[in-house]
Image (cartoon, rainbow, N blue to C red):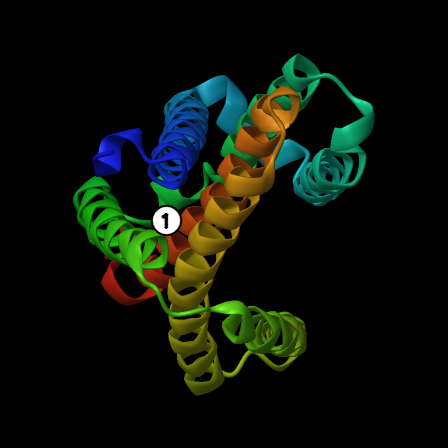
Amino acid sequence: MNEYQNPYYQHEASLDSKVSQVMKKVYVKMFLGLLVTAFVSYFCAASPAVLTFFSQHSSLMWVILLVELGLVFAITGAVNRMSSASATLLFYLFAVVNGLALFPIFIVYTGVSIGKTFFITAGTFGAMSIYGYLTSQDLTKWGSMLFMALIGLIICSVVNIFWANGTFEWIISGLGVLIFVGLTAWDTQNIKKMAAMAPAESVGKLATLGALSLYLDFINLFLYLLRFFGNSRD
């Protein structure tokens, strides 16, 4: 019996194929979500009617942020009680709402600096996601440390809204980059582990959850890097 006829080898090959298929679905959904967000943001920033509307109803941005949080909790908390199609629909709805929330960056920063930062983000994200996928090192400990660091980052960001200290803002941005670089690798490995154990009927939902996690990592990494590489229009 050669190695290709060995049941253990066949099982491992089948498992690798299953994980690979799930990860492809994750990355495709994530990429499409980013495209939706980019299109909505650009359209809003280029539309005088939209700009006028939001200038007259600026408080709506807070509503949009609350809707975003609600959608994230709905997808992550209730995904097992909904169909795969419903979870996917909510993910793309979240991408649309996030596009509404992010369109001001096209007004604040130049298009060239946004494009440059996007490619820097894509390269950094890609490298860390590949590392998370291929490494044999268990990144479980990273998860707990990064989660605690993320909570601290959120608290510091809220404090700085009222303190408005420029130096502290740069420190927060630097920490944000490091945290989401780490989370990209950890989330990728975590999705890979779940893909290996997931039953066939839950693959679609897992792909949506994975896409949401990596989408959030990418967007946050992009926003923190934009504070370093973005050039103001003023």
Depth check: 52 or 177 in front? 177
The residue under the point 38% across, 23% down is 39
The reply to whether residue 102 is visible in this rendering is yes
Rendering coords of residue 118 (x, y %): 26, 46
Image: 77 above or below 176: above
Quick one: quadrant of the N terminus?
top left
Instruction: Please give left or right for residue 113 compared with residue 174 in the image.
Output: left
Q: Amino acid at mark 1?
A: Val
Q: Secondary structure at mark 1?
A: helix
Mark 1 = which residue?
A: 108
Picture quarter with the C terminus: bottom left
Residue 17 drawn at (x, y percent)? 36, 30
The x, y position of residue 218, in whole percent, is 40, 48
For this orientation, the residue located farthest to the front is 1
* Residue 200 drawn above or below residue 101: above
Q: Nearer the viewer, residue 14 or 107?
A: 14
Q: Residue at x 40, y 41 (%)?
A: 8
The one nearer the camera, 92 or 52, is 92
Crowd band around label 1 with a 10 angstrom C-alpha radius: few (<14), some (14–19), many (20+): some
151 to the left or right of 119: right
Residue 37 placed where, x, y %? Answer: 45, 29
